[in-house]
Amino acid sequence: KKVKTKTRKARDDEIQAAKDMKETAARVDAEETRRNARSLVHELGLIYGRVVQAAYRGDARTRRVLLPSALRGLKKLAPAANADVVDACLNQIRGIARDDQCEPETALCCADAALVLADVSRSALELDDDGAFVDGVFR
């Protein structure tokens, strides 16, 4: 009877150890998942920011092809992004919409993104006095 009790106790200890290992693995996996998610958001933000920056510099193809997608993604990521990054992108988006060579569709995408980013960063949209931003959107 003592042998069976020791065997049963050893088996119970093994089961408990297995449960503990699962819990530990689950905690590590959750932490790793959060770390990976933060890294992914950071990398996507950098990519979207680079597209906005290229469009700000005047690359017409980037404005037409990539900018609308980048602005949609940036709007989704804005709540999780650094406020300084959001403000920098907002300033560049304003500059794109003010450009005389900006197409109306692009200007409308910029206006939509500017409204969302201004709300996220809790800053005023700061429409300029000369009306270039508004004129760019409502050409």
Image (spheres, grey):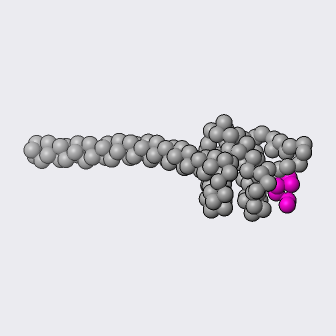
Residue at the image position 22 percent from the left and 45 percent from the top: 14
Residue at the image position 68 percent from the left and 40 percent from the top: 88
Give the residue furthest to the top: 84
Quadrant of the rendering where the C terminus is positioned? bottom right
Left or right: residue 23 compared with residue 66: left
Place of residue 67 in the rendered image (x, y in percent of width and height, measured from the top left) = 65, 57
Place of residue 109 in the rendered image (x, y in percent of width and height, measured from the top left) = 73, 58
Left or right: residue 42 compared with residue 106: left
Residue at the image position 73 percent from the left and 59 percent from the top: 106
Q: Nearer the viewer, residue 135 or 31?
A: 135
Q: Nearer the viewer, residue 96 or 9?
A: 96
Left or right: residue 108 compared with residue 49: right
Q: Decide if residue 119 is in sight here.
A: no
Instruction: Give the magenta range.
Output: 134-139
Residue 71 found in image quarter:
bottom right
- Is 60 inside the magenta-drawn segment? no
Place of residue 75 in the rendered image (x, y in percent of width and height, measured from the top left) = 67, 52
Total tally of numbered discs in the picture: 0
- Is 136 inside the magenta-drawn segment? yes
Q: Main secondary structure of the magenta part?
A: helix
Place of residue 108 in the rendered image (x, y in percent of width and height, measured from the top left) = 77, 59
Residue at the image position 78 percent from the left and 62 percent from the top: 104
Q: Nearer the viewer, residue 15 or 41?
A: 41
Q: Decide if residue 29 is in sight here.
A: yes
